[in-house]
Structure formats: structure tokens, C-alpha cells
Image: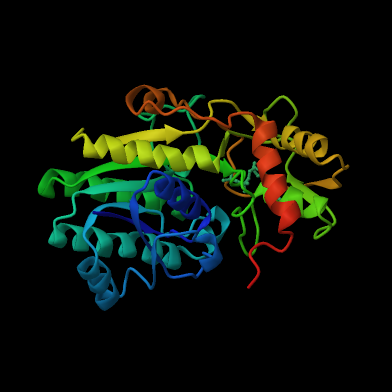
């Protein structure tokens, strides 16, 4: 039986496909390629289409014996979601409801869902625990929370079991250097710094240095994309073992400030990175750091690349070898 990976041509999806293939899983990848890259899909059976296309979805479910779904397909930029909530609700909520309904009708009862730390909003305390209050401060977080709520009701009504993984800051690239992060436009900190290092950009703008943190810049919990990918496999195993549904944070439990990330990149690439202090970015909490104790205990997940230097080294391998990302 196959594992269907929606959004499998995206950054985290493509890394998860690689880990699934290494475990000899039968993998079916579905992506509309609006943001994803066909070249990032290193194996499995590929379908190009959209979850909101009923005929297309019928075809994927008819042609394959799907056991479980790992659902990444979504938009994921906070700033964009504030400007265009309609697209976010449509692509993240409407698409997922179509998928869940198709799963229900086809008797597929296992789903691993790609959620986010943005479901919490401004944290009440650090590190963030899974039962902390969820009060998203942007449409992106709202759409992911809306899906988590739908999953709960699909579980209670149709016995569809889920694991929802609330990611903190995904970073780094596959150690092979074959796949990595390539967004257009790029908005994430580490790839932006890499673009300065490779000469594609003059400088990094540091969004605010007057936060209530030791050096005044925002603190985030960076987690290697392969560690993230492996958490999806651990989640799948939990569902296969017939365990209950669950929600888990996914981070390293250690925060780094924007300035610390800059210094680490300078050390790894051996170049000075030009930066300037810019105004705060709306919607950015000062500090987001996960407690990942629950996933470590219940899913026996353990990060392999939990040093920021290692995360940055793998990112640098990808960006220095592919300064223009995936060639079109
Ligand atoms: N950041 C920055 N300059 C940039 C991009 C990001 O100072 O050009 C900061 C941002 O304010 C946040 C951190 O870097 O504190 C991580 O941002 P990113 O967009 O990578 O991830 P997010 O935390 O929004 O998911």
C-alpha cells in the first residue's frame, strides 16, 4: 500500500519523500507545482494537479491503494496570509476539506498533518507546550488551526486518526546537497543570508533590534528539515500501531537570535555578511521556542542535526552549489 504525500515537491515534502523512499515505502506524490519544484521529487509516482480538482483527486485515489496521507500541500507565509487571507483559506482549508472528504469516502484513516507554531500566536510562556493557548495572530496560523479542529471531528465521527506536527523554524538541506530550500520570493532568514553570501543580494535586513531579548533581535527555534521529515515517519508508525491521534511540537528546544544566526553563517561560510537594522516585521513574536518533550517521549523522535552549525552547513552546501535554486 502507498503513502500519499501532498505537497511532496515542496521544501519539507520533498525531504520527507526521500526519507520514506529510504524506508522502502511505496510513495505517491501529489503537487500542483504552484510553489513546489518537480526536480525536488527524487522518486515515487508523481501526479501534477490540485486537491480542489475532484476528477484529479478521484484518479489519484482510484489508481493507487493508499494507506495513509502525509499532507503538506499549503501556503505557508505569514505576511502573505495577512494580505491575502482568501487564498490562504481556499488553499489551506478548502483543499484540506476536499482531501479529508475523499479520504473518508475511500476508507483511508491515517493522516499526518503539517501544522505550525503559528497556531499559538504570541506565546504565554517559553518553551511552548502543546496544551498552551492557541490564539493565532495571522490567517496562516488560523487556517492550520482550523484544519486541526476539523481533524478532531473527523476522528470522532469517522475514526480517522491523525498526528498534527506543529513545526517551529524548518531550516537546512539534505546532506546530499541534491535538494534544499527554494522559495520565490524568498522570505526566510537563513536562505536570505545565504543569498547575501553567494552575492545574489547586497544585505540582510534584520527586522527589529529592540525586542525584549538579550541582543534585541527575535529568537527562533531552528530545526533541520531532515529531522522534521523523520518526525513524519515516526508519526506514521504511531498511526500504524493503532495509537490515538495527537498534536506535537517539533523544534530543538533551543532558541537563536537573528544576530546569532548571522554570526553562525559567517563562521560556516567564512565571509562577512552585510546587514542593516530594519523596522520590526508585523506579526513577529519576540521569541518562539518549542518544548519537544512530548514528541521525544511518545514518538521516540530524536533530532540528528540539532546543532545550528550543522543546520547552516547543510544549507550552505545546497545554496553554494545551487545559487539559483532548482533550475527551471
Ligand atoms: N528575519 C529577519 N530578516 C529577514 C527574514 C527574517 O530579520 O530578512 C527574522 C524574522 O523577523 C524572524 C526570524 O528572522 O524573527 C525568522 O524568520 P523567518 O521568516 O525565517 O521564519 P518565521 O519565524 O517567520 O517562520
Q: Nearer the viewer, residue 175 or 30?
A: 175
Quadrant where the C terminus is found in the figure: bottom right
Residue at 83 percent across and 47 percent down: it is 276
In the image, residue 250 above or below residue 116: above
Q: Name the residue rendered at 18%, 35% in the picture.
A: 242
257 left or right, relative to 241: right
Q: Is residue 120 visible?
A: no
Front-lying residue, 315 or 178: 178
Q: Position of residue 234 (x, y in %)?
A: 36, 36
Q: Is residue 101 above or below residue 125?
A: below
Left or right of 190, for residue 39 = left
Give x and y (percent) for residue 270: 86, 39
The quarter of the rendering in which ligand 1 is drawn is top right
Q: Percent position (x, y) of residue 127?
A: 50, 24
Of residues 212 and 73, the one drawn nearer to the viewer in this rendering: 73
* Total numbered badges shown on the rendered structure: 0
Placement of 187 over or under 264, stated as above or below: below
Which quadrant of the figure has residue 74?
bottom left
Q: Residue at x 65, y 55 (%)?
A: 187
Q: Residue furthest left?
A: 157
* Residue 45 seen in the current view: yes
Q: Is residue 104 left or right of residue 217?
A: left
Amino acid at each position: 500500500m502507498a503513502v500519499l504525500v501532498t505537497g511532496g515537491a515542496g521544501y519539507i515534502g520533498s525531504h520527507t519523500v526521500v526519507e520514506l523512499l529510504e524506508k522502502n515505502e511505496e510513495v505517491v506524490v501529489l503537487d500542483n507545482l504552484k510553489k513546489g519544484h518537480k526536480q525536488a521529487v527524487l522518486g515515487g509516482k508523481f501526479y501534477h494537479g490540485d486537491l480542489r480538482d475532484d476528477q484529479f483527486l478521484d484518479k489519484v485515489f482510484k489508481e493507487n491503494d493508499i494507506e495513509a496521507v502525509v499532507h503538506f500541500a499549503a501556503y505557508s507565509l505569514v505576511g502573505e496570509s495577512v494580505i491575502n487571507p482568501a487564498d490562504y483559506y481556499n488553499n489551506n482549508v478548502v483543499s484540506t476539506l476536499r482531501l479529508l472528504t475523499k479520504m473518508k469516502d475511500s476508507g483511508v484513516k491515517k493522516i499526518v498533518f503539517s501544522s505550525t507554531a503559528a497556531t499559538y500566536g504570541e506565546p504565554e510562556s517559553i518553551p511552548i507546550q502543546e496544551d498552551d493557548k492557541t490564539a493565532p495572530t495571522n490567517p496562516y496560523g488560523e487556517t492550520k488551526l482550523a484544519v486541526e479542529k476539523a481533524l478532531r471531528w473527523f476522528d470522532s465521527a469517522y475514526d480517522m486518526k491523525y498526528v498534527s506536527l506543529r513545526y517551529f523554524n524548518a531550516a537546512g538541506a539534505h546532506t546530499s546537497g541534491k535538494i534544499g530550500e527554494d522559495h520565490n520570493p524568498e522570505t526566510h532568514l537563513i536562505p536570505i543570508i545565504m543569498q547575501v553570501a553567494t552575492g545574489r543580494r547586497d544585505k540582510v535586513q534584520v527586522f527589529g533590534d529592540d525586542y525584549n531579548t538579550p541582543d534585541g533581535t527575535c529568537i527562533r527555534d531552528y530545526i533541520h528539515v531532515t529531522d522534521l521529515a523523520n518526525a513524519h515517519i515516526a508519526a506514521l508508525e504511531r498511526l500504524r500501531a493503532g495509537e490515538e491521534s495527537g498534536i506535537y511540537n517539533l523544534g530543538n528546544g533551543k532558541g537563536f537570535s537573528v544576530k546569532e544566526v548571522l554570526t553562525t553563517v559567517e563562521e560556516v561560510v567564512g565571509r562577512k555578511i552585510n546587514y542593516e537594522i530594519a523596522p520590526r516585521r508585523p506579526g513577529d513574536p519576540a521569541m518562539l521556542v518549542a518544548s519537544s518533550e512530548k514528541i521525544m517521549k511518545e514518538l521516540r523522535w530524536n533530532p540528528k542535526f540539532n546543532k545550528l552549525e550543522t543546520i547552516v552547513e547543510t544549507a550552505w552546501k545546497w545554496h553554494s552549489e545551487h545559487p539559483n535554486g532548482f533550475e527551471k
